[in-house]
Amino acid sequence: MIRLLITGLLAYTAYRVAVRIIDEVPGDVAPLDMPGDEGRTLRRQSAKMGVEPKR
């Protein structure tokens, strides 16, 4: 019974720490691109510059 209580307290503490860390991150941070998105990123950059991507 004590082990269950300790496990619950550890899980709750980890949850509260994670929530506090997430709340500290400003809202204007851009998410990281997923691996394999290089082509899409290059197309977006080319579109911003007004240039057609070369293939």
Image (tube, grey):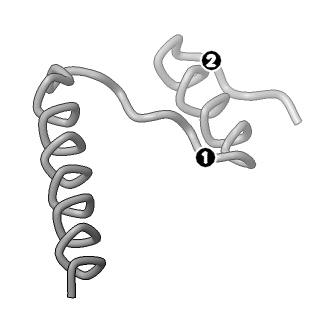
Image: 29 above or below 17: above
- Image quadrant in which the N terminus is located: bottom left
Q: Is residue 31 left or right of residue 11?
A: right
Q: Is residue 49 left or right of residue 39?
A: left
- Outermost residue on the bottom side: it is 1
Q: Which of the pair 13/26 is nearer the observer?
A: 13
Q: Quadrant of the C terminus?
A: top right
Q: Residue 20 shows which numbered tag? A: none
Question: How many numbered discs?
Answer: 2
- State the residue at coordinates (73%, 28%): 53
Give, as a three-letter code, the residue at label 1.
Met
Which residue is found at the position 35% from the left and 27% from the top? 30
Q: Is residue 49 above or below residue 30?
A: above
Give the camera-side residue of 50 and 34.
34
SS class, disc 1? loop
Q: SS class of the residue under badge 2?
A: loop
- On residue 34, which mark appears? 1
Q: Position of residue 43 (x, y in %)?
A: 62, 33
- Is 49 positioned to the left or the right of 53 in the image? left
Please name the residue that numbered disc 2 is placed on: 51
Depicted 11 relative to depicted 20: above or below = below
Residue 16 position within the rendered picture, expressed as x and y whole percent measured from the top left? 13, 47
Label 2 and label 1: CA atoms lie apart by: 24 Å
Q: Residue at x 50, y 34 (%)?
A: 32
